[in-house]
């Protein structure tokens, strides 16, 4: 195992931050698998799972079972980790510019596409190397203006050429679920069976250029431009490890075993555990609908994540105790109630929960801010 400490310039004189990467296996070996946690810095199930995974990877390396190159960045956001407000971590956005740490990553197809003119031939493996080199050059030349810009570039400079990218997050209160494109359905199925995810939300392009999509969308865009000369070597996903309060060693150790099964199944490890679960239910991300609070007040639930619901069903209530007013929270579509907000109070217009259904209900930018 090799440890890499990457300095990040601080926002003011006399301050610096450090991004720590761990490497197992031989650099240049395939498959290359990149895992990170804590990009939203108030979401800790993923980093704890990666802590346990790293111990398992140490053992696997000592036994000579690492066949690929595995990179783990357990705490991918040292900026967000240090930003607290009124005794609470902010986590999702930076305090300086309110940037979502998981949006706005570089569009590698736009940055590198022109440089590929006339360079792609009949060999897909050779083309993949050429494209990855163009991506690396684009990242090296990218303009960095803020510390969030720098963080995005430093994360992608080691992940852009991976075969598989897993970005570990969590929701407020939720079942285990993940987001994936339509590009690699075989790996989508495998990931569900290894992690025990209840739900996979599938979409070609979700919008916002989140970290996971910044690794898959460029290959799709380049295939649209250059055709079959462009392979589809990258699978990337956002894994939502349940809710923010689901942080305990027993669960994290089990989740680490699931990731070891996945790493073995994709060939990064040998002699790993077998997938222990059934496949995740796959539903369109455009069929996941959010319920918005019609009034501000106290939030109470009569349902919980994982419940099957029908459109119009009462899921809970918002109560304005001052005016003695109560309104029902109703299911916005028929399907799986997969997430609820953590807070027991809300403002008018605030999103309270999501239900994933089969019917397409949305278009455009499909990710929440």
Image (cartoon, rainbow, N blue to C red):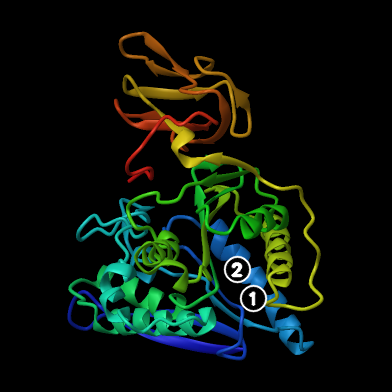
Location of residue 256 by image quarter: bottom right
Q: Are marks 1 and 2 in contact (CB under 8 Å)?
A: yes
Q: How many marks?
A: 2
Residue 235 percent coordinates (x, y) = 54, 64
Q: Nearer the viewer, residue 184 or 68?
A: 184
Single out the residue that lies furthest toward the top: 324
Is residue 20 or residue 322 the one in the foreground? 20
Question: Which residue occupies 32% across, 79% down?
Answer: 116
Q: Is residue 16 visible?
A: no
Write the residue at 21% across / 76% down.
Answer: 144
Residue 116 numbered tag = none
User: Which of the labelled discs sits on residue 50, or is there none?
Assistant: 2
Relative placement, left or right, of 71 versus 195 is left
Please provide percent x and percent y for residue 306. 63, 34
> Can residue 221 be seen by looking at this rendering?
yes
State the residue at coordinates (40%, 62%).
211
**Residue 212, image x, y percentages:** 45, 61
Q: Quadrant of the N terminus?
A: bottom right
Q: In the picture shown, does residue 78 fall above or below 249?
A: below
The residue beneath circle 1 is 54
Q: Secondary structure at mark 1?
A: helix
């Amino acid at each position: 195992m090799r440890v890499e400490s990457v300095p990040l310039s601080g926002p003011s004189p006399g301050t610096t931050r450090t991004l720590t990467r761990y490497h197992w296996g031989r650099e240049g070996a395939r498959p290359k698998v990149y895992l990170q946690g804590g990009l939203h810095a108030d979401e800790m199930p993923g980093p704890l799972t990666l802590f346990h995974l790293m111990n398992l990877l140490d053992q696997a390396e000592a036994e000579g079972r690492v066949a690929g190159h595995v990179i783990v960045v357990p705490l991918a956001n040292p900026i967000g980790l240090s930003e607290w407000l009124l005794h609470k971590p902010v986590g999702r956005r930076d305090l300086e510019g309110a940037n979502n740490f998981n949006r706005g990553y570089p569009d590698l197809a736009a940055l590198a596409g022109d440089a590929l003119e006339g360079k792609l031939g009949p060999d897909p493996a050779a083309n993949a190397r050429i494209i990855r080199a163009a991506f690396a050059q684009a990242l090296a030349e990218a303009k960095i203006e803020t510390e969030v810009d720098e963080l995005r570039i430093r994360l992608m400079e080691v992940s852009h050429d991976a075969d598989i990218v897993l970005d570990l997050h969590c929701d407020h209160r939720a079942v285990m679920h993940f987001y994936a494109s339509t590009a690699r359905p075989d790996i989508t199925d495998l990931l569900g069976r290894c992690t025990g995810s209840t739900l996979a939300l599938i979409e070609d392009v979700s919008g916002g250029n989140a970290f996971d999509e910044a690794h898959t969308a460029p290959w799709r865009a380049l295939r649209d431009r250059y055709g079959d000369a462009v392979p589809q070597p990258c699978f990337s996903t956002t894994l939502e490890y349940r809710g923010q309060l689901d942080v305990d060693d027993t669960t994290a150790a089990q989740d680490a075993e699931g990731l070891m099964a996945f790493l073995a199944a994709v060939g990064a490890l040998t002699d790993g555990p077998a997938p222990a679960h059934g496949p995740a239910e796959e539903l369109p991300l455009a069929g996941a609908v959010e319920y918005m609070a019609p009034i501000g007040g106290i939030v109470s639930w009569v349902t919980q994540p994982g419940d099957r619901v029908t459109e119009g069903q009462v899921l809970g209530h918002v109560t304005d105790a001052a005016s003695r007013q109560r309104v029902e929270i109703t299911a916005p579509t028929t399907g799986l109630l997969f997430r609820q907000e953590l807070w027991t109070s809300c403002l008018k217009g605030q999103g309270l929960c999501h239900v994933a259904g089969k019917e397409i209900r949305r278009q455009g930018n499909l990710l929440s801010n």
